[in-house]
Amino acid sequence: MLALLPKQSFALRLFALLNAAVLAASCSDAWAQASTAPPAPGVFPKVSINAGVGLSGARDFAEPFDAVVSLAFQSFGGLSSYCSGALIADDMVLTARHCDPFVGEQAVFGESVASPDLIVDIAQVIYPDSPFGSLLDGGDVAVVRLAQPVPDTVATPLRLTTETDTLVGSTAVVIGYGARGVEATTQGPSGVRVAGTNIIDRFGRAVGEFSSGTNLFSVDFDNGTAFGNTISGSDATPLPLESAPARGDSGGPLLVEINDEFLIAGVLSGGTTPWGSIGDISWWTGIQDYQAEIEALGGVFASLIPDLPPGDFNGDGVVDGADYAYWRNNLGGDESLLNGNGDGLGNIGLGDLIIWRAGFGGGQEPGAVAAAPEPSAVLLATLASVLGISAVRRPRGAVSTTAA
């Protein structure tokens, strides 16, 4: 097995600067040669999208994702995109450690690096894990602080998720500013945001290559044949927008739709072919292990707990007699048992009962609401004992208390 290619380093970008003038005249020929040559085996840092739907379709699909950005440096010919990332706070971009971003380089917002909506300098590079390590060790994560906040008229930060193995079998968006083509048969230079979809086939160690990291998402680039279905046991049927990343997409987010919102589950680390050929296996490093560090930098992880109606103490989505029984059985206990639907006073008591009475029937289908059960005299006496109050039984719908 070939070793991993080195990360996108400053030395490589300097080499690109020194050769920019020479390469300019032969750029189109070089891309044509790269697109027709068979991909070498091994493992490559990834940096781009190849969309079976076609380049225009992939660009259109990527258009709404304004928080996905290009990391670029100044070359003799202008800005050169070398990696991708995602805005997670108004001045923070999540990317891959192996992209090796440098202070003074740029984060470029917009559909194309050639016609950007906004360019912001990188002011600081932060590594939630070690700044050193292998591509697939589970720590291929970096955050860059921008020199100025990004207005929400330009981009809205994406939230993140800690979901991992539960995402296996779900559809994800793969997106970035890398090299682009149709099933790696034609290639274009990086710098245009394109996107497609793929099915998350595995979570754990990388499929197809040794990895010390166990927080990696793996997908393959299917075309309906055994040749494309390189992850054993996965479905060979391609999605309508079936895609794989390629050079230039490194650091781009793995986006999953949960509760009608696209959330970041990982950052692109690498894959088995440089151009995202059919059968390519790509890997994203999951970010769930770095939640605390990312939140400290302003990133927001979405809660997957659905909003519950007031008085739904047992968390089943409806306010009914079961919640009354739950309240009764936990009377005097810590209010954390009420799933955040109590009165916030610390202990389970009369105030929580009032909330339950007011919300009774919430979350149920129309016509399914029965009368709220009345607290028994024994229960009221118990309540008075627990809370240190005297309770007077009142007509239905009214409860009064007098301080002891």
Image (spheres, helix red, strand yellow):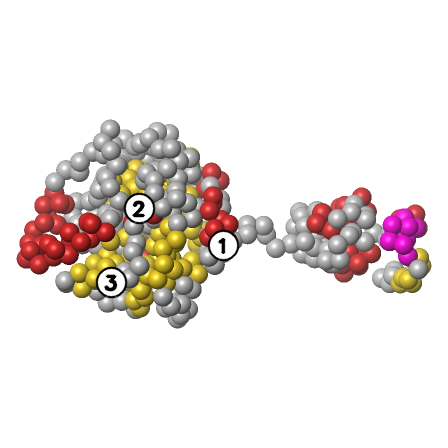
Residue 46, x across and y down, in percent: 27, 45
Q: Is residue 337 above or below residue 203?
A: below
Residue 47, x across and y down, in percent: 26, 48
Would you say residue 51 is visible in this rendering?
Answer: no
Callout 2: helix, strand or loop? helix
Highlighted range, magenta: 380-389
> CA–CA distance between discs 2 and 3?
21 Å
Dividing the picture into quadrants, the one containing residue 391 is bottom right
Residue 153, x across and y down, in percent: 39, 71
Q: Which residue is mark 2?
A: 98
Residue 231, x across and y down, in percent: 33, 32
Callout 3: helix, strand or loop? loop
Looking at numbered disc 3 in the image, what kind of residue is underneath it? Answer: Val
Dividing the picture into quadrants, the one containing residue 122 is bottom left
Callout 1: helix, strand or loop? helix
Residue beneath the point at 27% across and 31% down: 226
Would you say residue 121 is visible in this rendering?
Answer: yes
Q: Which residue is mark 1?
A: 295
Looking at numbered disc 2 in the image, what kind of residue is underneath it? Answer: His
Q: Kindly indicate whether the residue at mark 1 contacts the one at mark 2 (C-beta within 8 angstroms).
A: no
Closer to the N terminus: mark 2 or mark 1? 2
In terms of depth relative to the viewer, which is nearer, 188 or 114?
114
Q: Which residue is mark 3?
A: 113
